[in-house]
Amino acid sequence: MLARAVTCAVVGLEGYVIQVEVDISPGLPRFTIVGLPDAAVQEARERVRAAIRNSGCEFPMRRITTNMAPADLPKAGPAYDLPIALAVLISSGQLPAAPGLTMFLGELSLDGTLRHTNGVLPMVAVARDEGFETVFVPACDAGEAALVEGVKVYPVETLGHLLRHFRAECLIEPVSKDVSGASGLARRREAAGKQGREFELADVRGQEHAKRALEVAASGGHNLLMTGPPGSGKTLLARCIPSIMPTMTYDEAIDVTKIYSVSGLLPSSSPFIDERPFRAPHYTISNAGLVGGGRIPRPGEVTLSHRGVLFLDELPEFGRNVLEVLRQPIEDRVVTISRAQGTISYPANFMLVAARNPCPCGFLNDTVKQCVCRPSEIARYSQRISGPLLDRMDLFVDVPRVEYEKLTGASDAERSEQVRDRVEASIQAQRERFDGTSLLNNSEMGPNEVWKFCQMDDAAKGLMKTAMSRMSLSARGVPRFFFGGGGGGGGAGGGVGGGGGGCGGGRGVGKGIPSYSEGVAYDCGPVWRRSDKCVASGGGASVQAGGANGLRGVRLYFLIVA
């Protein structure tokens, strides 16, 4: 007798409906699985056999052939255990045929208990998109599956429990609609309340200009590079960024949770990712660890930081080859991994934040301790970071030594909640500006959008012309000025300079020097690359700059726009 059950396979972040077909025929006892199964799927034979027996049913001692269609799609992982077991029981006449438009997911233990299964969220999303009305999942994954709207989710504890449900002996109640979808996510957030954050911006003493840069970067999704001596607070500042970033929307939370679900990194205490990711890999990471890889490509750090922050501390210590692989994901916001089995694309829309010392000893241009590095050592140190990678950074900030008075004196610094309110207001202004487009924030603007939204008056054009010639800006670097500084001239929220305006309201953008001079101030390059010194000033900002090697090599001595 032929029996069928429906399940799902995940390749990358995409799901595919799988038909599990079981045929039991006379012959010597044999259990065969075909359809490109991997080792974990092949081992399902032993798990299914033991789970059926330990659930009070009889395992048929005949020839059992299991086909998983489509046969040309690789099948990996233990999520096929439950549909295989059900198809065997249906084919042997111990269970009625499964209802239509129903999908089954889950790994079986030997006693019939359903275990946690990776990738439940994208699988349930595929079930909804393909018109399935009901999904049976392990009880421990029901909260994750319930994030998907438009499908009934049934939590299953054991195989025996599911058998009694189909025999109408003990019905399983579906997950309540009150805890599913966007409304369920909102209720969970409300129930959890505002928990204290580990890192608070008000705890950082001094560094007001760096805090301003963090606010600008978080508002527009801009890449940020901090340079300063050891102990100046670069790492602490970076770890405070998630506390000022806006709360993720429902769609963003679903996207991030899918990634962590497929990677097996969902925390056991929560079925969803509610906070924006903050990833800080060690500088010994490999290429595959950073962008993803493996025989079956898995998400790397650039994907795990999607919609969040990727923090690279001690940037020059990373291997040059490792850093170079970031160039394409930063530009395209997606990473494509090609292997012999096929090509997989993962999202990689992250905010890159990096920190570095100015030289090997760390005290170049320090006001207290003298640098002991030779010029050749400083040159070699600076060459560890390529020009094309630096050209993709939006904001460059010096983080100098903090003075004793600021460390020990009373602090009236703003708390993260206050800054986040301004960031969220600026994000809303950007959404209004980009209404009807696929853009989400200023950093995603292309040349056409820059020239459309960022108009300049004659004085601002003069400042931009001087900056471009003196700082050796590339064609990519020029637009950075339009959304790389902070808000003067009534700019629209969320970005910087004229292109995004400051963290404030309104749909318009600044047209004058005050709107762009802070963009010039923040758009500075390596502190150690200085030649042809010049001074560009305007609107309250003062920048001492020097271009070198075709890079935006600028030494920053600025006052933020008033």
Image: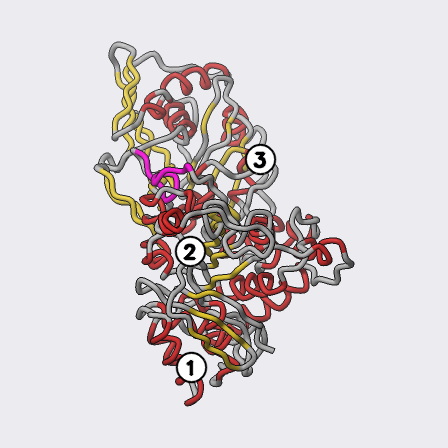
Q: Residue lying farthest top?
A: 28
Q: Distance between the residues labelled 3 and 1?
A: 54 Å
Q: Given the image, on which type of amino acid does mark 3 rest?
A: Ser
Residue 552 visible at all: yes
Marker disc for residue 349? 2
Percent of width and height locating residue 515: 51, 80
Q: Quadrant of the N terminus?
A: top left
Percent of width and height locating residue 144: 53, 42
The residue that disc 3 covers is 268
- Report the magenta residues as a range: 284-294
Percent of width and height locating residue 544: 47, 71
What residue appears at the point 46 percent right and 71 percent down from the top-left corner? 483
In the drawing, does residue 197 fall left or right of residue 408? left
Q: Given the image, on which type of amino acid does mark 1 rest?
A: Leu
Q: Distance between the residues labelled 2 and 1?
A: 32 Å
75, 545: nearer the viewer: 545
The residue that disc 1 covers is 463
In the displayed structure, 456 sits above or below 199; it is: below
Q: Is residue 293 magenta?
A: yes
Describe the element under mark 1 as helix, strand or loop. Answer: helix
Q: Are the residues flagged by discs 3 and 1 in contact, CB closer than 8 Å? A: no
In the displayed structure, 491 sits above or below 405; it is: below
Q: Given the image, on which type of amino acid does mark 2 rest?
A: Asn
N-terminal label among 2 and 3:
3
